[in-house]
């Protein structure tokens, strides 16, 4: 396929337009030292099969640090981020919320000791757009103070009414790469008006207020060209229910990433977010023909395609690569060798 040496799809289809972040579809959280180390080992193992990380690891200070031991936990996490166990550079950290007394110390410690290797920092419980902006500025200031040239992307967690009301403004903030939905805190914010069943794997997809929140977050993220990340499923032993939830989040609600809180959830989420074989085959054929035609309109099985549909199929192909799906060798070499 000599045509594959032609213009890359990203250049042909997006040009100088700001590109969306390309993040692994699964974000796995761990806060206890043994589990953090096991998560890094699993990331390296699964990544070795795909040639890149198929899920991110978020080391957790908010739920992982004992009260009074936050600084020591930050030192441990910085050590792990810097360690050889971080094979692919896809390890981030969740810090405490911006109102917590240890927030600035955690930011300073992590940036000073591991800023050059941080994939991102997750900031929970964003109260509103003003607080989100201050958190991003705090991270930037620490980076500049310590001479860290690596831009550390910020991920945020939407958990309150006010944050949801301002989600479009928050999503548009420079420096933000992803927004997640904090299901448990959001339900609790309703002071008992939403039943506890809405926190479960079934209720969270049927309660109107919860569903509305998920849709507004996803829409705001896509409008701002950042990544919407779906919330946890706490029933970690029910792999069938998790698979259905992940498929619904991906195929119906527009999410391109999802949280994991148990290692067994990781392969289920990755498989659910992966395109099916027929979609990948169509994407390979359509994009190959488009590139051969120098991205002019083409026909595939009697259907006309142009740059609008080419963009869609590029995202399909990119998702297949992210999730470690097998691709033709010439396609992977031409399109993803520099990814």
Image (spheres, grey):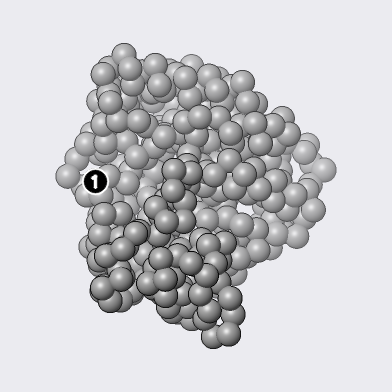
* Residue 22 against residue 108 in the figure, above or below: below
User: Measuring 22% from the left and 36% from the top, which residue is drawn there?
Assistant: 82
User: Measuring 31% from the left and 63% from the top, which residue is drawn there?
Assistant: 6
Displayed quadrant of residue 67: top left
Spot occupied by residue 234 in the image (x, y as percentages of width and height):
56, 55
User: Measuring 40% from the left and 59% from the top, which residue is drawn there?
Assistant: 9
- Classify mark 1: helix, strand or loop: loop
- Quadrant, the N terminus: bottom left
Query: On the picture, is 75 further left or further right than 193?
Result: left
Displayed quadrant of residue 93: top left
User: Measuring 62% from the left and 44% from the top, which residue is drawn there?
Assistant: 223
Q: How many marks?
A: 1
Displayed quadrant of residue 251: bottom right
Question: Most extreme residue toward the right, as rendered?
Answer: 193
* Residue 21 against residue 130 in the figure, above or below: below
Spot occupied by residue 289 in the image (x, y as percentages of width and height):
42, 75
**Residue annotated with mark 1:** 86
Spot occupied by residue 90 in the image (x, y as percentages of width and height):
32, 46
In front here: 221 or 121?
221
């Amino acid at each position: 396929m000599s045509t594959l040496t032609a213009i890359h799809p990203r250049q042909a289809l997006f040009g100088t337009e700001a590109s969306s972040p390309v993040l692994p579809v699964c974000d796995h959280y761990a806060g206890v030292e043994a589990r953090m180390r096991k998560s890094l080992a699993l990331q390296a193992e699964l990544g070795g099969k795909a040639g890149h990380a198929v899920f991110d690891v978020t080391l957790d200070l908010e739920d992982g640090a004992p009260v009074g031991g936050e600084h020591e936990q930050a030192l441990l996490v910085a050590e792990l981020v810097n360690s050889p166990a971080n094979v692919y550079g896809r390890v981030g950290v969740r810090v405490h919320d911006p109102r917590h007394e240890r927030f600035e110390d955690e930011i300073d410690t992590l940036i000073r000791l591991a800023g050059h290797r941080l994939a991102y920092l997750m900031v929970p419980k964003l109260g509103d757009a003003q607080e989100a902006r201050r958190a991003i500025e705090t991270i930037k200031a620490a980076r500049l103070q310590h001479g860290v040239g690596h831009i550390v992307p910020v991920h945020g967690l939407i958990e309150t009414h006010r944050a949801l009301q301002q989600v479009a403004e928050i999503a548009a903030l420079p420096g933000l790469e992803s927004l997640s939905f904090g299901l448990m805190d959001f339900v609790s914010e309703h002071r008992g008006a939403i039943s506890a069943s809405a926190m479960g794997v079934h209720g969270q997809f049927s309660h109107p207020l919860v569903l509305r929140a998920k849709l507004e977050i996803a829409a705001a993220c896509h409008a701002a060209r950042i990544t919407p990340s779906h919330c946890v499923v706490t029933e970690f032993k029910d792999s069938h229910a998790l698979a259905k939830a992940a498929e619904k989040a991906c195929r119906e609600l527009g999410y391109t990433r999802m949280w994991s809180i148990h290692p067994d959830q990781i392969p289920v989420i990755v498989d659910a977010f992966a395109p099916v074989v027929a979609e990948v085959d169509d994407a390979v054929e359509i994009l190959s023909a488009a590139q051969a035609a120098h991205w002019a309109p083409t026909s595939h099985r009697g259907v006309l395609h142009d740059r609008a549909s080419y963009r869609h199929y590029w995202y399909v192909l990119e998702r297949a690569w992210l999730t470690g799906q097998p691709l033709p060798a010439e396609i992977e070499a031409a399109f993803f060798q520099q990814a």
